[in-house]
């Protein structure tokens, strides 16, 4: 099949001259095959040129990367035995052809569809939103060479995911970026992994004059975090002693409460609402209060008779009512998976964004009342705080 050789010659020449954009092989001659198309592009993989072939089947895609010469053999075999329509795109010309039943192929040359070469990078460049490594080394997330420690992989992923979420929220709420001094409080800061990353992102990436305060009940962690903050030059990051329920929250633009246990999450949400915070970001932990309140003898008895199912139902009800109560106070809420359960079981996040629109409180409280009736719940702790 000389014509196929001609197409291969055009392909090889375009790669040699670095004019290649992509090659598409389609229309399987075997109607029973699930393979519909093969898409070929040039990729730099570990600084080596390879051809990446995406085999597009009816219900899935399979990607295989080949060294150049091996790819030529695979492509020619596909042209001869399997697929009959070929479209080669370069920045100098396009070439197309369809192999007929008798094996003949007529090539057509057309004007180039593309004027610029595509990005050859195979691996997606991840957008890194935190620039610092010194504090991650001091907190034992990275080793002295800047590599993630073996037992800190999940924590590192959690840190980066958290900052991605913050980035999206801050960019959306542009008024926060215009603050002369953005006031942020992290209630229940723990060892400060996320607090440090938040400060790093706000000051170094978002270029905000942020004042971040971490509130924690363990004096040893407060001392550690303050020492690290001073060591890495985070001037406006401070940690201080305080219980969420008792803490007098100053003027706050952004309230964070990650993994505050049981009703401590409600205390944090309440304080954020009363402080008129623009953003309230919570990742709840434990849902004991509502679990104790649920009446096992309701019509949902079958769902509640197994402990694990009752626990999960309590989580859903608790966080649903939290979101509704935040909406009643003028917040647009979102509840979503913070990070995959592969990395942490504490993976739900509730975000409230303050708005000035009118709120139908009657409708919201009817939804809450309906949920409480259905599960025999007397009260929700956050509801009591807001009365």
Image (spheres, rainbow, N blue to C red):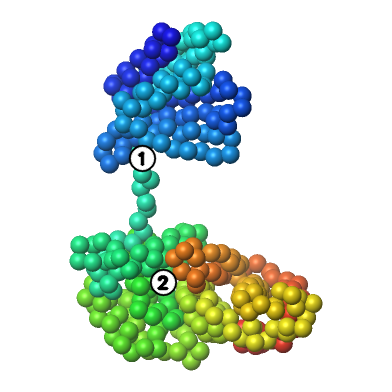
**Horizontally, is 25 left or right of 50 in the view?**
right
User: Residue placed at 42% from the left, 75% from the top?
Assistant: 183
Hey, which quadrant is residue 74 in on the image? Answer: top left
User: Residue placed at 43% from the left, 82% from the top?
Assistant: 188
User: Residue placed at 28% from the left, 85% from the top?
Assistant: 223
The tag on residue 259 is: none
**Horizontally, is 301 left or right of 148 in the view?**
right
x then y, percent, for residue 125: 35, 47
Mark 1, mark 2: which one is toward the viewer?
A: 1
Q: Looking at the image, which is closer to me, 57 or 246? A: 57
Instruction: Give the position of the C terminus as an image quadrant.
Output: bottom right
On the question of residue 28 being in view, the answer is: yes
User: What residue is pinned by disc 1?
Assistant: 122
Hey, which quadrant is residue 194 in on the image? Answer: bottom left
Q: Dot 1: what SS?
A: loop
The residue carrying pointer 2 sits among few (fewer than 14), some (14 to 19) or many (20 or more) residues within 10 Å by Cα, namely some
The residue carrying pointer 1 sits among few (fewer than 14), some (14 to 19) or many (20 or more) residues within 10 Å by Cα, namely some
x then y, percent, for residue 31: 61, 24
User: Residue placed at 69% from the left, 83% from the top?
Assistant: 294
Which residue reaches farthest bottom? 246
User: What residue is pinned by disc 2?
Assistant: 182
**Horizontally, is 371 left or right of 188 in the view?**
right
Instruction: Give the position of the N terminus as an image quadrant.
Output: top left
Q: Looking at the image, which is closer to me, 254 or 322? A: 322
On the question of residue 318 being in view, the answer is: no
Q: Dot 2: what SS?
A: strand
Q: Compared with residue 151, is residue 50 higher up or lower down, i.e. above or below?
A: above
Which residue reaches farthest left? 144
Q: Earlier along the polypeptide chain: callout 1 or callout 2?
A: 1
x then y, percent, for residue 138: 25, 73
Q: Compared with residue 326, is residue 125 higher up or lower down, i.e. above or below?
A: above
Total numbered circles:
2
């Amino acid at each position: 099949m000389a014509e196929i050789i001609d197409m291969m010659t055009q392909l090889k020449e375009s790669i040699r001259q670095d004019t290649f954009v992509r090659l598409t092989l389609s229309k399987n001659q075997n109607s029973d095959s699930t393979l519909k198309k093969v898409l070929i592009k040039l990729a730099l993989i570990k600084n080596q040129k390879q051809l990446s072939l995406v085999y597009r089947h009816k219900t899935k895609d399979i990607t295989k990367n080949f060294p150049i010469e091996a790819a030529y053999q695979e492509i020619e075999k596909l042209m001869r035995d399997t697929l009959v329509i070929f479209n080669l795109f370069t920045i100098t010309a396009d070439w197309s052809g369809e192999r007929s039943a008798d094996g003949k192929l007529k090539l057509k040359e057309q004007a180039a569809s593309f004027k610029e070469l595509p990005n050859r990078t195979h691996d997606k460049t991840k957008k890194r939103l935190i620039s610092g490594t010194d504090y991650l080394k001091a907190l034992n997330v990275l080793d002295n060479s800047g590599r993630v420690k073996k037992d800190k992989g999940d924590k590192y992923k959690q840190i980066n995911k958290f900052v991605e979420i913050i980035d999206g929220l801050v960019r959306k709420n542009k008024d926060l970026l215009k603050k002369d001094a953005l006031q942020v409080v992290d209630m229940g800061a723990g060892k400060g992994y996320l607090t440090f990353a938040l400060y790093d992102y706000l000051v170094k990436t978002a270029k905000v004059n942020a004042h971040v305060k971490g509130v924690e009940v363990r004096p040893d962690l407060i001392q550690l975090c303050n020492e690290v903050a001073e060591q890495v030059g985070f001037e406006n990051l401070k940690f201080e002693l305080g219980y969420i329920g008792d803490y007098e929250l100053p003027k706050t633009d952004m309230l964070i409460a990650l993994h505050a246990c049981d009703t401590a999450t409600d205390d944090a949400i309440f304080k954020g609402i009363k402080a008129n915070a623009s953003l309230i970001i919570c990742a709840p932990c434990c849902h004991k209060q509502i679990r104790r309140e649920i009446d096992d003898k309701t019509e949902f008895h079958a769902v509640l008779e197994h402990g694990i199912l009752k626990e999960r139902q309590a989580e859903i009800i608790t966080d649903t009512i939290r979101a509704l109560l935040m909406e009643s106070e003028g917040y647009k809420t979102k509840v979503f998976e913070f990070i995959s359960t592969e990395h942490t079981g504490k993976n739900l996040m509730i975000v409230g964004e303050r708005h000035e629109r009118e709120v139908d409180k009657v409708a919201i409280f009817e939804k809450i009342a309906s949920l409480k009736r259905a599960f025999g719940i007397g009260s929700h702790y956050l509801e009591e705080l807001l009365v």
